Amino acid sequence: MPEATTLSFALTYTGTLAMAALMFLAQLAAITILLALAGVARLLTLPVHTAVRRRQQ
């Protein structure tokens, strides 16, 4: 059986890597959601811009 310090180091290292992976996936999901929202907002504003341009003419 490995020493207690080696085991605790391995568990700490694995936990740190797992947390980093979870944080990376969360940031990736947040960026994807924000880009999707920006795209939808841009698509929804196109008819509004078109209507405003037609009223000004």
Image (spheres, rainbow, N blue to C red):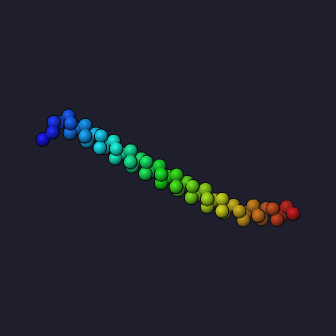
Q: Relative to 12, does residue 26 appear above or below in the rendering?
A: below
**Would residue 2 appear left or right of 56 to someone viewing this image?**
left
**Would residue 21 appear left or right of 13 to someone viewing this image?**
right
Q: Quadrant of the rendered structure where residue 16 is? A: top left
- Residue at 75% across / 61% down in the picture? 49
Which one is nearer the viewer's eye here, 56 or 19? 19
Percent across and percent down for residue 33 are 52, 56
**Would residue 4 appear left or right of 26 to someone viewing this image?**
left
Which one is nearer the viewer's eye here, 29 or 51? 29
**Would residue 17 appear left or right of 47 to someone viewing this image?**
left
Percent across and percent down for residue 26 are 44, 51
Q: Residue furthest left?
A: 1
- Residue at 28% across / 39% down in the picture? 12
Percent across and percent down for residue 20 are 38, 44
Q: Indicate the quadrant containing the C terminus: top left, top right, bottom left or bottom right.
A: bottom right
**Circle count:** 0
- Residue at 15% across / 39% down in the picture? 2
- Residue at 47% across / 49% down in the picture? 27
Q: Residue furthest right?
A: 57
Percent across and percent down for residue 53 are 81, 62
Q: Relative to 3, does residue 43 appear above or below in the rendering?
A: below
Q: Indicate the quadrant containing the N terminus: top left, top right, bottom left or bottom right.
A: top left
